[in-house]
Image (cartoon, rainbow, N blue to C red):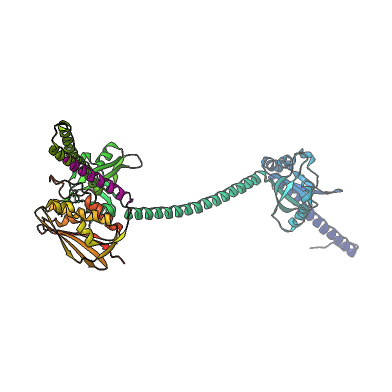
Amino acid sequence: MTVEQTPSYDSRQDEIDALKASLAEANEQLLETRYRLEEANDMIEAIRSGEVDALVVKGDNGHQLYTLKSADAAYRIFIEQMTTGAATLDDKGFILYANSPFATLLDQPLEKVAGRFFCDFISSQEAGECIKLMETAWKQPGLQQELALTSSFRKELPVLLSLKPFQLDGNYFMSVIITDLTDQKKQQQLLREKNQQLLEAQLTARDLNTNLEQTVQQRTKELYTNQERLTRILETMAEGVEILDLDGTLTYANPMAQKILGITQSSDDSSHYNNPKWPAFKLDDSPLPDAEHPQAVAQSSGKSVYDFEIGIQPPGRQMFYISINAAPIRDESGNITGSIATFTDVTQRRISIQQKDDFISVASHELRTPITALKASLQLLERFKNDGNPELMHRLIGQSNKSLNKVSILVNDLLDAKKMTEGHLQLNTSDFLIAELVNECCQHVRVGGDFQLVYEGEKNITVHADKDKIDQVLVNFVNNAVKYAPSSKEIRIRVVVDGGFARVTVIDNGPGIASERLPELFKRYYRVHNDGSNISGLGLGLYISAEIIRKHGCEIGVNSQLGRGSEFWFTLPLAT
Ligand code: ADP
Protein backbone atom coordinates (compact mmCIF):
# COMPACT_ATOMS: atom_id res chain seq x y z
CA MET A 1 0.00 0.00 0.00
CA THR A 2 1.33 3.42 -0.91
CA VAL A 3 0.85 6.52 1.27
CA GLU A 4 0.78 9.81 -0.57
CA GLN A 5 2.80 12.25 1.40
CA THR A 6 1.47 15.82 1.52
CA PRO A 7 3.76 18.72 1.60
CA SER A 8 3.06 19.64 5.11
CA TYR A 9 2.20 16.63 7.03
CA ASP A 10 2.27 18.35 10.39
CA SER A 11 -0.02 21.16 9.41
CA ARG A 12 -2.45 18.68 7.96
CA GLN A 13 -2.34 16.73 11.15
CA ASP A 14 -3.17 19.84 13.16
CA GLU A 15 -6.03 20.54 10.84
CA ILE A 16 -7.27 17.02 11.30
CA ASP A 17 -7.01 17.31 15.03
CA ALA A 18 -8.88 20.57 14.96
CA LEU A 19 -11.53 19.01 12.82
CA LYS A 20 -11.71 16.06 15.12
CA ALA A 21 -12.10 18.37 18.12
CA SER A 22 -14.84 20.39 16.51
CA LEU A 23 -16.52 17.14 15.45
CA ALA A 24 -16.40 15.95 19.02
CA GLU A 25 -17.85 19.27 20.18
CA ALA A 26 -20.48 19.08 17.50
CA ASN A 27 -21.26 15.55 18.61
CA GLU A 28 -21.52 16.70 22.15
CA GLN A 29 -23.83 19.56 21.18
CA LEU A 30 -25.86 17.12 19.17
CA LEU A 31 -26.08 14.82 22.15
CA GLU A 32 -27.15 17.72 24.34
CA THR A 33 -29.67 18.84 21.78
CA ARG A 34 -30.91 15.29 21.44
CA TYR A 35 -31.20 15.03 25.15
CA ARG A 36 -33.15 18.27 25.33
CA LEU A 37 -35.29 17.20 22.48
CA GLU A 38 -35.97 13.95 24.23
CA GLU A 39 -36.80 15.89 27.35
CA ALA A 40 -39.08 18.21 25.39
CA ASN A 41 -40.64 15.19 23.78
CA ASP A 42 -41.15 13.58 27.19
CA MET A 43 -42.73 16.81 28.50
CA ILE A 44 -44.98 17.06 25.49
CA GLU A 45 -45.88 13.39 25.94
CA ALA A 46 -46.50 13.98 29.64
CA ILE A 47 -48.66 17.01 28.95
CA ARG A 48 -50.51 15.07 26.31
CA SER A 49 -51.04 12.08 28.54
CA GLY A 50 -52.22 14.32 31.42
CA GLU A 51 -49.31 13.66 33.72
CA VAL A 52 -48.70 17.43 34.03
CA ASP A 53 -51.54 19.72 35.15
CA ALA A 54 -49.92 23.07 35.33
CA LEU A 55 -46.89 25.06 34.52
CA VAL A 56 -45.37 27.62 36.76
CA VAL A 57 -43.74 30.42 34.89
CA LYS A 58 -41.48 32.87 36.54
CA GLY A 59 -42.28 36.35 35.26
CA ASP A 60 -41.48 39.89 36.27
CA ASN A 61 -44.25 39.81 38.95
CA GLY A 62 -43.11 36.57 40.52
CA HIS A 63 -44.44 33.08 39.78
CA GLN A 64 -47.52 32.56 37.70
CA LEU A 65 -49.41 29.27 37.59
CA TYR A 66 -50.58 28.17 34.21
CA THR A 67 -52.86 25.19 34.22
CA LEU A 68 -53.11 23.01 31.18
CA LYS A 69 -56.69 23.15 30.04
CA SER A 70 -57.12 19.54 29.03
CA ALA A 71 -55.71 18.13 32.28
CA ASP A 72 -57.27 20.77 34.49
CA ALA A 73 -60.80 20.33 33.18
CA ALA A 74 -61.62 17.10 35.05
CA TYR A 75 -60.21 18.41 38.30
CA ARG A 76 -61.84 21.79 37.87
CA ILE A 77 -65.26 20.15 37.39
CA PHE A 78 -64.56 17.95 40.32
CA ILE A 79 -63.40 20.83 42.50
CA GLU A 80 -66.30 22.99 41.44
CA GLN A 81 -68.71 20.27 42.40
CA MET A 82 -67.24 19.89 45.82
CA THR A 83 -69.43 21.14 48.62
CA THR A 84 -66.42 22.42 50.47
CA GLY A 85 -64.40 25.45 49.51
CA ALA A 86 -60.94 24.96 48.03
CA ALA A 87 -58.16 27.41 47.26
CA THR A 88 -54.53 27.35 46.18
CA LEU A 89 -52.28 29.99 47.72
CA ASP A 90 -48.82 31.06 46.74
CA ASP A 91 -45.99 31.11 49.25
CA LYS A 92 -47.12 34.58 50.41
CA GLY A 93 -50.66 33.49 51.14
CA PHE A 94 -52.31 35.08 48.10
CA ILE A 95 -55.08 33.18 46.44
CA LEU A 96 -54.02 31.81 43.06
CA TYR A 97 -57.10 29.75 42.57
CA ALA A 98 -60.43 29.31 44.46
CA ASN A 99 -63.49 27.23 43.67
CA SER A 100 -67.04 28.57 43.51
CA PRO A 101 -68.19 27.03 46.82
CA PHE A 102 -65.46 29.04 48.55
CA ALA A 103 -66.69 32.22 46.85
CA THR A 104 -70.25 31.31 47.88
CA LEU A 105 -69.11 30.97 51.47
CA LEU A 106 -67.70 34.47 51.21
CA ASP A 107 -70.74 35.84 49.42
CA GLN A 108 -68.39 37.20 46.76
CA PRO A 109 -68.12 36.67 43.02
CA LEU A 110 -65.31 34.25 42.19
CA GLU A 111 -63.32 36.80 40.25
CA LYS A 112 -63.09 39.02 43.33
CA VAL A 113 -61.60 36.22 45.38
CA ALA A 114 -58.60 35.25 43.22
CA GLY A 115 -55.51 37.31 43.89
CA ARG A 116 -56.66 38.35 47.40
CA PHE A 117 -54.74 37.66 50.58
CA PHE A 118 -56.40 34.64 52.11
CA CYS A 119 -56.32 35.85 55.72
CA ASP A 120 -58.27 38.98 54.71
CA PHE A 121 -61.33 36.75 54.57
CA ILE A 122 -60.89 35.66 58.16
CA SER A 123 -62.69 37.62 60.91
CA SER A 124 -60.66 40.54 62.19
CA GLN A 125 -60.28 38.97 65.65
CA GLU A 126 -58.77 35.84 64.15
CA ALA A 127 -56.71 37.35 61.29
CA GLY A 128 -53.51 37.08 63.38
CA GLU A 129 -54.34 33.44 64.14
CA CYS A 130 -54.73 32.84 60.40
CA ILE A 131 -51.30 34.27 59.56
CA LYS A 132 -49.73 32.18 62.31
CA LEU A 133 -51.51 29.13 60.98
CA MET A 134 -50.15 29.73 57.48
CA GLU A 135 -46.60 30.00 58.79
CA THR A 136 -46.89 26.79 60.79
CA ALA A 137 -48.59 24.91 57.96
CA TRP A 138 -45.45 25.18 55.78
CA LYS A 139 -43.67 23.06 58.37
CA GLN A 140 -46.56 20.82 59.37
CA PRO A 141 -48.43 19.50 56.38
CA GLY A 142 -52.03 18.55 57.02
CA LEU A 143 -52.59 21.14 59.74
CA GLN A 144 -56.19 21.88 60.59
CA GLN A 145 -57.79 24.68 62.56
CA GLU A 146 -61.22 26.15 63.08
CA LEU A 147 -61.55 29.86 62.29
CA ALA A 148 -64.35 32.20 61.28
CA LEU A 149 -64.82 33.59 57.77
CA THR A 150 -66.31 37.01 57.39
CA SER A 151 -68.32 38.46 54.62
CA SER A 152 -69.98 41.78 54.09
CA PHE A 153 -73.48 40.29 54.15
CA ARG A 154 -73.35 37.55 56.62
CA LYS A 155 -72.09 37.43 60.06
CA GLU A 156 -69.16 35.24 60.86
CA LEU A 157 -69.15 31.75 59.46
CA PRO A 158 -67.36 28.96 61.34
CA VAL A 159 -65.08 26.96 59.04
CA LEU A 160 -62.44 24.29 59.34
CA LEU A 161 -59.26 25.05 57.42
CA SER A 162 -57.15 22.08 56.26
CA LEU A 163 -53.79 23.20 54.90
CA LYS A 164 -51.33 21.24 52.85
CA PRO A 165 -48.23 22.74 51.26
CA PHE A 166 -46.95 21.37 47.96
CA GLN A 167 -44.09 22.00 45.64
CA LEU A 168 -44.30 22.39 41.93
CA ASP A 169 -41.26 22.94 39.76
CA GLY A 170 -39.27 24.28 42.67
CA ASN A 171 -42.05 26.64 43.73
CA TYR A 172 -44.09 26.37 46.94
CA PHE A 173 -47.87 26.47 47.14
CA MET A 174 -50.47 25.85 49.77
CA SER A 175 -53.71 24.06 49.17
CA VAL A 176 -56.51 25.03 51.54
CA ILE A 177 -59.75 23.16 51.99
CA ILE A 178 -62.44 25.26 53.69
CA THR A 179 -65.24 23.26 55.25
CA ASP A 180 -68.36 25.10 56.37
CA LEU A 181 -68.96 24.13 60.01
CA THR A 182 -72.26 25.98 60.36
CA ASP A 183 -74.34 22.81 60.27
CA GLN A 184 -71.80 20.95 62.31
CA LYS A 185 -71.78 23.79 64.86
CA LYS A 186 -75.54 23.84 64.82
CA GLN A 187 -75.55 20.09 65.33
CA GLN A 188 -72.95 20.46 68.04
CA GLN A 189 -75.01 23.21 69.66
CA LEU A 190 -78.08 21.05 69.30
CA LEU A 191 -76.17 18.13 70.73
CA ARG A 192 -74.95 20.31 73.58
CA GLU A 193 -78.50 21.48 74.22
CA LYS A 194 -79.76 17.91 74.02
CA ASN A 195 -76.97 16.80 76.31
CA GLN A 196 -77.86 19.59 78.69
CA GLN A 197 -81.51 18.61 78.51
CA LEU A 198 -80.49 14.99 79.02
CA LEU A 199 -78.40 16.00 81.99
CA GLU A 200 -81.26 18.02 83.42
CA ALA A 201 -83.64 15.15 82.74
CA GLN A 202 -81.17 12.82 84.42
CA LEU A 203 -80.93 15.16 87.38
CA THR A 204 -84.70 15.45 87.51
CA ALA A 205 -84.97 11.67 87.19
CA ARG A 206 -82.39 11.28 89.94
CA ASP A 207 -84.31 13.74 92.11
CA LEU A 208 -87.52 11.96 91.30
CA ASN A 209 -85.88 8.68 92.04
CA THR A 210 -84.58 9.99 95.33
CA ASN A 211 -87.99 11.46 96.06
CA LEU A 212 -89.61 8.22 95.03
CA GLU A 213 -87.28 6.24 97.24
CA GLN A 214 -87.95 8.62 100.11
CA THR A 215 -91.67 8.52 99.43
CA VAL A 216 -91.60 4.73 99.23
CA GLN A 217 -89.61 4.59 102.45
CA GLN A 218 -91.94 7.07 104.07
CA ARG A 219 -95.02 5.24 102.80
CA THR A 220 -93.57 1.90 103.87
CA LYS A 221 -92.91 3.36 107.30
CA GLU A 222 -96.40 4.86 107.46
CA LEU A 223 -97.87 1.61 106.22
CA TYR A 224 -95.94 -0.32 108.83
CA THR A 225 -96.93 2.19 111.54
CA ASN A 226 -100.55 2.09 110.42
CA GLN A 227 -100.51 -1.67 110.26
CA GLU A 228 -98.88 -1.81 113.65
CA ARG A 229 -101.45 0.64 114.99
CA LEU A 230 -104.27 -1.29 113.41
CA THR A 231 -102.97 -4.54 114.82
CA ARG A 232 -102.67 -3.01 118.31
CA ILE A 233 -106.16 -1.52 117.99
CA LEU A 234 -107.57 -4.84 116.83
CA GLU A 235 -105.76 -6.67 119.60
CA THR A 236 -106.91 -4.32 122.36
CA MET A 237 -110.38 -3.57 121.09
CA ALA A 238 -113.26 -4.22 123.45
CA GLU A 239 -115.20 -5.27 120.37
CA GLY A 240 -114.81 -8.50 118.48
CA VAL A 241 -113.79 -8.24 114.82
CA GLU A 242 -114.12 -11.06 112.33
CA ILE A 243 -113.75 -11.39 108.58
CA LEU A 244 -115.51 -14.00 106.49
CA ASP A 245 -114.80 -14.86 102.87
CA LEU A 246 -117.58 -15.48 100.36
CA ASP A 247 -117.82 -19.16 101.37
CA GLY A 248 -118.42 -18.11 104.96
CA THR A 249 -114.95 -19.28 106.02
CA LEU A 250 -113.59 -17.29 108.94
CA THR A 251 -110.30 -15.74 107.80
CA TYR A 252 -109.68 -13.34 110.69
CA ALA A 253 -110.79 -13.03 114.29
CA ASN A 254 -109.23 -10.55 116.71
CA PRO A 255 -108.51 -11.66 120.30
CA MET A 256 -111.82 -10.29 121.60
CA ALA A 257 -113.77 -12.12 118.88
CA GLN A 258 -111.88 -15.27 119.77
CA LYS A 259 -112.78 -14.73 123.41
CA ILE A 260 -116.46 -13.92 122.87
CA LEU A 261 -117.10 -16.63 120.30
CA GLY A 262 -114.75 -19.24 121.76
CA ILE A 263 -112.78 -19.34 118.50
CA THR A 264 -109.26 -20.74 118.27
CA GLN A 265 -106.70 -20.20 115.53
CA SER A 266 -106.32 -23.21 113.27
CA SER A 267 -102.98 -24.86 114.06
CA ASP A 268 -102.18 -25.88 110.48
CA ASP A 269 -103.33 -22.75 108.64
CA SER A 270 -102.92 -19.28 110.15
CA SER A 271 -105.58 -17.84 107.82
CA HIS A 272 -108.28 -20.17 109.10
CA TYR A 273 -109.99 -20.50 112.43
CA ASN A 274 -111.68 -23.36 114.17
CA ASN A 275 -115.03 -21.65 114.23
CA PRO A 276 -117.37 -23.75 116.39
CA LYS A 277 -120.43 -22.40 114.48
CA TRP A 278 -122.77 -22.48 117.42
CA PRO A 279 -126.47 -22.09 116.64
CA ALA A 280 -127.69 -18.50 116.49
CA PHE A 281 -131.11 -17.24 117.61
CA LYS A 282 -133.33 -14.24 117.08
CA LEU A 283 -134.39 -12.23 120.11
CA ASP A 284 -137.71 -14.07 120.19
CA ASP A 285 -135.64 -17.25 120.71
CA SER A 286 -136.48 -18.68 117.26
CA PRO A 287 -133.49 -20.06 115.25
CA LEU A 288 -131.73 -17.53 112.99
CA PRO A 289 -131.51 -18.86 109.39
CA ASP A 290 -127.97 -18.65 107.92
CA ALA A 291 -129.15 -16.25 105.20
CA GLU A 292 -130.40 -13.80 107.84
CA HIS A 293 -127.08 -13.63 109.67
CA PRO A 294 -125.92 -9.95 109.44
CA GLN A 295 -122.71 -10.91 107.61
CA ALA A 296 -124.63 -12.98 105.07
CA VAL A 297 -127.05 -10.05 104.62
CA ALA A 298 -124.12 -7.61 104.13
CA GLN A 299 -122.58 -9.92 101.50
CA SER A 300 -125.81 -10.57 99.61
CA SER A 301 -127.19 -7.01 99.75
CA GLY A 302 -123.87 -5.12 99.53
CA LYS A 303 -125.12 -2.88 102.34
CA SER A 304 -124.00 -2.43 105.91
CA VAL A 305 -126.06 -3.78 108.79
CA TYR A 306 -126.00 -2.00 112.16
CA ASP A 307 -126.66 -3.08 115.76
CA PHE A 308 -128.25 -6.39 114.86
CA GLU A 309 -128.67 -8.40 118.03
CA ILE A 310 -128.55 -12.19 118.02
CA GLY A 311 -128.34 -14.86 120.68
CA ILE A 312 -125.70 -17.58 120.50
CA GLN A 313 -126.09 -20.86 122.26
CA PRO A 314 -122.86 -22.65 123.12
CA PRO A 315 -123.48 -26.24 124.16
CA GLY A 316 -123.80 -26.69 127.93
CA ARG A 317 -123.58 -22.95 128.59
CA GLN A 318 -126.02 -20.09 128.95
CA MET A 319 -127.06 -18.31 125.80
CA PHE A 320 -125.16 -15.08 125.25
CA TYR A 321 -126.09 -12.13 123.09
CA ILE A 322 -124.00 -10.07 120.67
CA SER A 323 -124.79 -6.90 118.78
CA ILE A 324 -123.28 -7.02 115.28
CA ASN A 325 -122.33 -4.31 112.77
CA ALA A 326 -121.51 -5.92 109.44
CA ALA A 327 -120.25 -4.50 106.14
CA PRO A 328 -119.32 -6.04 102.79
CA ILE A 329 -115.64 -6.10 101.72
CA ARG A 330 -114.99 -5.21 98.10
CA ASP A 331 -111.94 -5.56 95.83
CA GLU A 332 -110.55 -2.77 93.60
CA SER A 333 -113.23 -3.49 90.99
CA GLY A 334 -116.00 -3.21 93.55
CA ASN A 335 -116.77 -6.93 93.65
CA ILE A 336 -117.76 -8.26 97.05
CA THR A 337 -115.13 -10.66 98.34
CA GLY A 338 -116.40 -11.17 101.86
CA SER A 339 -117.59 -9.28 104.89
CA ILE A 340 -116.31 -7.79 108.11
CA ALA A 341 -118.20 -7.70 111.37
CA THR A 342 -117.60 -5.93 114.64
CA PHE A 343 -119.59 -7.08 117.62
CA THR A 344 -119.90 -6.67 121.36
CA ASP A 345 -121.20 -8.96 124.01
CA VAL A 346 -124.50 -7.36 125.01
CA THR A 347 -125.64 -10.15 127.28
CA GLN A 348 -125.61 -7.81 130.28
CA ARG A 349 -127.54 -5.18 128.35
CA ARG A 350 -130.04 -7.80 127.24
CA ILE A 351 -130.36 -9.09 130.83
CA SER A 352 -130.85 -5.51 132.05
CA ILE A 353 -133.50 -4.87 129.42
CA GLN A 354 -135.13 -8.17 130.29
CA GLN A 355 -134.93 -7.31 133.99
CA LYS A 356 -136.39 -3.89 133.34
CA ASP A 357 -139.24 -5.45 131.34
CA ASP A 358 -139.78 -7.99 134.10
CA PHE A 359 -139.54 -5.23 136.67
CA ILE A 360 -142.15 -3.11 134.96
CA SER A 361 -144.56 -6.01 134.79
CA VAL A 362 -143.77 -6.97 138.40
CA ALA A 363 -144.04 -3.36 139.61
CA SER A 364 -147.37 -2.88 137.81
CA HIS A 365 -148.61 -6.13 139.27
CA GLU A 366 -147.35 -5.26 142.76
CA LEU A 367 -148.97 -1.85 142.67
CA ARG A 368 -152.20 -3.08 141.15
CA THR A 369 -152.84 -5.59 143.96
CA PRO A 370 -152.96 -3.10 146.89
CA ILE A 371 -154.59 -0.44 144.73
CA THR A 372 -157.37 -2.86 143.74
CA ALA A 373 -157.80 -3.78 147.39
CA LEU A 374 -157.86 -0.09 148.35
CA LYS A 375 -160.41 0.63 145.64
CA ALA A 376 -162.64 -2.20 146.87
CA SER A 377 -162.42 -0.99 150.49
CA LEU A 378 -163.29 2.57 149.47
CA GLN A 379 -166.27 1.37 147.38
CA LEU A 380 -167.56 -0.61 150.38
CA LEU A 381 -167.05 2.41 152.63
CA GLU A 382 -169.01 4.54 150.17
CA ARG A 383 -171.84 2.01 149.99
CA PHE A 384 -172.15 1.43 153.75
CA LYS A 385 -171.29 4.90 155.03
CA ASN A 386 -174.86 5.61 156.20
CA ASP A 387 -175.58 2.13 157.61
CA GLY A 388 -174.51 3.09 161.11
CA ASN A 389 -172.19 0.06 161.45
CA PRO A 390 -169.07 1.41 163.12
CA GLU A 391 -167.43 -2.02 163.31
CA LEU A 392 -167.64 -2.49 159.54
CA MET A 393 -166.45 1.06 159.02
CA HIS A 394 -163.48 0.43 161.28
CA ARG A 395 -162.54 -2.76 159.45
CA LEU A 396 -162.83 -1.18 156.01
CA ILE A 397 -160.74 1.83 157.09
CA GLY A 398 -158.12 -0.58 158.49
CA GLN A 399 -158.02 -2.53 155.19
CA SER A 400 -157.73 0.73 153.24
CA ASN A 401 -154.81 1.82 155.40
CA LYS A 402 -153.08 -1.52 154.95
CA SER A 403 -153.39 -1.34 151.15
CA LEU A 404 -152.25 2.28 151.18
CA ASN A 405 -149.25 1.32 153.29
CA LYS A 406 -148.29 -1.35 150.79
CA VAL A 407 -148.53 1.18 147.96
CA SER A 408 -146.52 3.65 149.98
CA ILE A 409 -143.79 1.04 150.75
CA LEU A 410 -143.54 0.10 147.07
CA VAL A 411 -143.38 3.74 145.97
CA ASN A 412 -140.75 4.46 148.66
CA ASP A 413 -138.66 1.53 147.44
CA LEU A 414 -138.89 2.83 143.89
CA LEU A 415 -137.90 6.33 144.95
CA ASP A 416 -135.04 4.99 147.12
CA ALA A 417 -133.71 2.88 144.25
CA LYS A 418 -133.79 5.90 141.96
CA LYS A 419 -131.96 7.98 144.57
CA MET A 420 -129.28 5.27 144.95
CA THR A 421 -128.82 4.93 141.21
CA GLU A 422 -128.37 8.65 140.85
CA GLY A 423 -125.96 8.75 143.82
CA HIS A 424 -128.19 11.00 145.92
CA LEU A 425 -128.14 8.89 149.07
CA GLN A 426 -127.37 11.08 152.11
CA LEU A 427 -126.41 9.64 155.52
CA ASN A 428 -127.37 11.18 158.81
CA THR A 429 -124.99 9.38 161.20
CA SER A 430 -124.93 9.15 165.03
CA ASP A 431 -123.71 6.75 167.74
CA PHE A 432 -126.27 4.19 168.88
CA LEU A 433 -126.48 0.76 170.46
CA ILE A 434 -127.26 -1.95 167.96
CA ALA A 435 -129.19 -3.93 170.58
CA GLU A 436 -131.52 -0.96 170.96
CA LEU A 437 -132.12 -0.76 167.19
CA VAL A 438 -132.80 -4.50 166.98
CA ASN A 439 -135.28 -4.35 169.86
CA GLU A 440 -137.20 -1.43 168.38
CA CYS A 441 -137.30 -2.80 164.83
CA CYS A 442 -139.75 -5.10 163.14
CA GLN A 443 -142.70 -4.56 165.47
CA HIS A 444 -145.07 -5.65 162.70
CA VAL A 445 -143.43 -9.08 162.73
CA ARG A 446 -143.42 -9.38 166.45
CA VAL A 447 -147.09 -8.22 166.67
CA GLY A 448 -148.10 -10.72 163.96
CA GLY A 449 -147.01 -13.48 166.29
CA ASP A 450 -146.13 -16.03 163.61
CA PHE A 451 -142.39 -15.47 163.86
CA GLN A 452 -140.03 -15.13 166.73
CA LEU A 453 -137.09 -12.74 166.58
CA VAL A 454 -134.20 -14.00 168.69
CA TYR A 455 -131.31 -11.68 169.65
CA GLU A 456 -127.87 -13.34 169.87
CA GLY A 457 -124.45 -11.97 170.80
CA GLU A 458 -123.18 -8.85 172.49
CA LYS A 459 -125.65 -6.21 173.64
CA ASN A 460 -123.39 -3.27 174.31
CA ILE A 461 -121.96 -2.67 170.89
CA THR A 462 -122.24 0.97 169.88
CA VAL A 463 -121.90 1.85 166.21
CA HIS A 464 -121.60 5.12 164.31
CA ALA A 465 -124.15 5.03 161.47
CA ASP A 466 -127.42 6.38 160.05
CA LYS A 467 -129.89 4.71 162.43
CA ASP A 468 -132.99 5.03 160.18
CA LYS A 469 -131.19 3.64 157.14
CA ILE A 470 -129.73 0.71 159.12
CA ASP A 471 -133.23 0.06 160.45
CA GLN A 472 -134.41 -0.08 156.82
CA VAL A 473 -131.73 -2.71 156.05
CA LEU A 474 -132.57 -4.80 159.10
CA VAL A 475 -136.32 -4.66 158.34
CA ASN A 476 -135.59 -5.74 154.76
CA PHE A 477 -133.56 -8.75 155.92
CA VAL A 478 -136.26 -9.76 158.44
CA ASN A 479 -139.09 -9.21 155.92
CA ASN A 480 -137.27 -11.37 153.39
CA ALA A 481 -136.81 -14.11 155.98
CA VAL A 482 -140.54 -13.96 156.65
CA LYS A 483 -141.37 -13.94 152.90
CA TYR A 484 -138.89 -16.48 151.58
CA ALA A 485 -138.41 -18.73 154.62
CA PRO A 486 -141.99 -18.90 155.98
CA SER A 487 -141.37 -22.32 157.54
CA SER A 488 -138.56 -20.91 159.67
CA LYS A 489 -140.52 -19.60 162.61
CA GLU A 490 -137.42 -18.51 164.42
CA ILE A 491 -135.42 -15.66 162.96
CA ARG A 492 -132.12 -15.07 164.75
CA ILE A 493 -130.34 -11.73 164.80
CA ARG A 494 -126.70 -12.10 165.75
CA VAL A 495 -124.54 -9.10 166.69
CA VAL A 496 -120.79 -9.50 167.15
CA VAL A 497 -117.59 -7.48 166.84
CA ASP A 498 -115.47 -8.80 163.98
CA GLY A 499 -112.21 -7.31 162.72
CA GLY A 500 -112.85 -3.83 164.16
CA PHE A 501 -116.44 -3.71 162.87
CA ALA A 502 -119.82 -4.63 164.25
CA ARG A 503 -121.26 -7.53 162.29
CA VAL A 504 -125.03 -8.04 162.18
CA THR A 505 -126.40 -11.32 160.74
CA VAL A 506 -130.05 -12.28 160.15
CA ILE A 507 -130.37 -16.08 160.11
CA ASP A 508 -133.28 -18.19 158.94
CA ASN A 509 -133.75 -21.94 158.46
CA GLY A 510 -135.61 -21.57 155.20
CA PRO A 511 -135.05 -23.22 151.81
CA GLY A 512 -131.75 -21.40 151.18
CA ILE A 513 -130.53 -20.11 147.86
CA ALA A 514 -128.62 -21.91 145.07
CA SER A 515 -124.94 -20.91 145.11
CA GLU A 516 -124.91 -19.65 141.46
CA ARG A 517 -127.65 -17.13 142.37
CA LEU A 518 -125.78 -15.62 145.30
CA PRO A 519 -123.56 -13.18 143.32
CA GLU A 520 -126.68 -11.70 141.67
CA LEU A 521 -128.80 -11.13 144.79
CA PHE A 522 -127.70 -7.56 145.52
CA LYS A 523 -128.17 -6.36 141.93
CA ARG A 524 -131.04 -4.13 140.97
CA TYR A 525 -134.33 -5.87 140.01
CA TYR A 526 -132.86 -9.30 140.74
CA ARG A 527 -135.34 -11.79 142.06
CA VAL A 528 -134.74 -15.46 142.58
CA HIS A 529 -138.44 -16.13 142.68
CA ASN A 530 -139.56 -14.15 139.66
CA ASP A 531 -140.30 -17.25 137.62
CA GLY A 532 -143.93 -17.82 138.45
CA SER A 533 -143.68 -17.64 142.24
CA ASN A 534 -146.42 -15.58 143.80
CA ILE A 535 -144.25 -13.96 146.47
CA SER A 536 -144.50 -10.26 145.88
CA GLY A 537 -141.46 -7.98 145.58
CA LEU A 538 -139.65 -5.66 143.19
CA GLY A 539 -136.12 -7.05 143.51
CA LEU A 540 -135.00 -3.77 145.03
CA GLY A 541 -134.75 -4.49 148.78
CA LEU A 542 -131.28 -6.08 148.79
CA TYR A 543 -130.03 -3.58 146.19
CA ILE A 544 -131.09 -0.65 148.42
CA SER A 545 -129.61 -2.38 151.50
CA ALA A 546 -126.28 -2.93 149.71
CA GLU A 547 -126.11 0.72 148.64
CA ILE A 548 -126.79 1.92 152.22
CA ILE A 549 -124.10 -0.34 153.71
CA ARG A 550 -121.54 0.53 151.01
CA LYS A 551 -122.24 4.22 151.61
CA HIS A 552 -121.09 3.56 155.22
CA GLY A 553 -117.86 2.12 153.80
CA CYS A 554 -118.84 -1.33 155.03
CA GLU A 555 -119.66 -4.75 153.61
CA ILE A 556 -122.79 -6.74 152.96
CA GLY A 557 -123.13 -10.41 152.00
CA VAL A 558 -124.96 -13.69 152.23
CA ASN A 559 -124.07 -17.26 153.13
CA SER A 560 -126.65 -19.75 152.00
CA GLN A 561 -127.04 -23.31 150.90
CA LEU A 562 -130.09 -24.94 149.38
CA GLY A 563 -132.02 -26.67 152.14
CA ARG A 564 -129.91 -25.17 154.91
CA GLY A 565 -131.33 -21.67 155.33
CA SER A 566 -129.69 -18.32 154.71
CA GLU A 567 -127.52 -15.87 156.65
CA PHE A 568 -127.68 -12.28 155.37
CA TRP A 569 -125.08 -10.06 157.06
CA PHE A 570 -123.61 -6.56 157.05
CA THR A 571 -120.92 -4.72 158.98
CA LEU A 572 -120.98 -1.26 160.59
CA PRO A 573 -118.29 1.05 161.93
CA LEU A 574 -117.85 0.92 165.71
CA ALA A 575 -118.34 4.22 167.55
CA THR A 576 -115.03 5.66 168.70
P1 ADP B 1 -137.70 -8.78 146.64
O1 ADP B 1 -137.89 -9.32 147.98
O2 ADP B 1 -138.53 -7.62 146.33
O3 ADP B 1 -137.75 -9.83 145.56
P2 ADP B 1 -134.95 -8.38 147.46
O4 ADP B 1 -133.90 -7.60 146.85
O5 ADP B 1 -135.25 -8.07 148.87
O6 ADP B 1 -136.21 -8.24 146.54
O7 ADP B 1 -134.57 -9.90 147.37
C1 ADP B 1 -134.02 -10.37 146.19
C2 ADP B 1 -134.27 -11.87 146.08
O8 ADP B 1 -133.47 -12.56 147.04
C3 ADP B 1 -135.65 -12.30 146.41
O9 ADP B 1 -136.46 -12.24 145.27
C4 ADP B 1 -135.47 -13.69 146.93
O10 ADP B 1 -135.58 -14.59 145.86
C5 ADP B 1 -134.08 -13.73 147.43
N1 ADP B 1 -134.07 -13.76 148.96
C6 ADP B 1 -133.92 -12.69 149.76
N2 ADP B 1 -133.91 -13.08 151.05
C7 ADP B 1 -134.07 -14.42 151.05
C8 ADP B 1 -134.11 -15.40 152.06
N3 ADP B 1 -134.02 -15.12 153.37
N4 ADP B 1 -134.28 -16.71 151.68
C9 ADP B 1 -134.38 -17.03 150.40
N5 ADP B 1 -134.33 -16.16 149.40
C10 ADP B 1 -134.16 -14.86 149.72
Name the residue nearer the viewer: 192 or 26: 192
Residue 473 visible, this angle: yes
Left or right, 507 with respect to 182, comes to: left
Name the residue nearer the viewer: 455 or 108: 455
Bounds of the magenta segment: 399-425
100 lies above or below 501: above
The C terminus - image quarter: bottom left
Left or right, 187 with respect to 52, comes to: left
Instruction: Classify residue 563 by image quadrant.
Output: bottom left
Name the residue nearer the viewer: 411 or 444: 444
| Residue 49 screen position, x and y as percent | 68, 45
Left or right, 42 with respect to 223, comes to: right
Name the residue nearer the viewer: 88 or 420: 420
Task: In the displayed orientation, state which residue is furthest to the front.
Answer: 388
Residue drawn at (54%, 51%), measured in percent from left and top? 202
| Residue 407 screen position, x and y as percent | 22, 42
| Residue 570 screen position, x and y as percent | 23, 60
Instruction: Classify residue 31 by image quadrant.
Output: bottom right
Q: Is residue 417 magenta?
A: yes
Q: Is residue 406 magenta?
A: yes
The N terminus - image quarter: bottom right
Residue drawn at (76%, 44%), measured in percent from left and top? 150
The kind of secondary structure the magenta stretch mainly shows is: helix
Left or right, 94 with respect to 12, comes to: left
Residue 247 visible, this angle: no
